[in-house]
Amino acid sequence: MENYNITVGEDFSLIVSLKTRDGLAYTGANGGSVSAYLVDRRQAGTLNGSKVAQADSGNADWAAGTVEVVFADTDTAGFSVGRYYLRLDITTSGGDIKKIIGEDVFQVWSET
């Protein structure tokens, strides 16, 4: 488990490697879409800020199970200080939606 710090009003990005239960790369996002959120509890939780749609570009390679999550400064400006978890909503090319909540902790804090 990792701990990440996000400062309100600053850019934050993270590379996420998606794996199946067998440890293979999860390629279900390829041809679909991914939205990223921060939630306040691992099981359900309140969303912190609005969703950020992710594209298969830059450091992302959905066919290899790699997603880049980018929260721009305008996204984090509305975040509340606290402890959160990353939730990815993956819409497959067939329209199915998989929701994945990671174990890593994202600590949002403010310099003011």
Image (cartoon, rainbow, N blue to C red):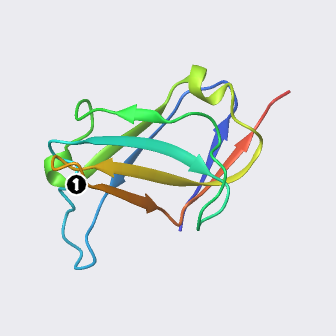
Give the residue pinned by disc 1.
Answer: 65
Task: Decide: is 41 above or below 63.
Answer: below
Q: Label 1 amino acid? A: Gly
Which picture quadrant has residue 78? top right
* Image side of residue 50 versus residue 59, left or right: right
- What's the residue at 33%, 42% (across, down)? 34
Task: Decide: is 98 above or below 9.
Answer: below
Badge 1 crowding class, 10 Å Cα cut-off, few under 14, some 14 to 19, many 20 or more, is: some
- What's the residue at 22%, 48% (across, down)? 95
Q: Residue 2's x, y, as percent? A: 54, 62
- What's the residue at 16%, 50% (across, down)? 94
**Residue that lies at the very extreme toward the top in this rendered image:** 74
- Quadrant where the C terminus is found in the figure: top right
* Image side of residue 61 versus residue 35, left or right: left
Q: Residue 64's x, y, as percent? A: 16, 53
- What's the residue at 25%, 40% (across, down)? 60
**Residue that lies at the very extreme toward the right in this rendered image:** 112
Q: Residue 8's x, y, as percent? A: 70, 30
**Residue that lies at the very extreme toward the front in this rendered image:** 95
Badge 1 marks a residue whose secondary structure is loop
* Image side of residue 89 versus residue 27, left or right: right
Q: Residue 87's x, y, as percent? A: 49, 53
Task: Decide: is 43 above or below 69.
Answer: below
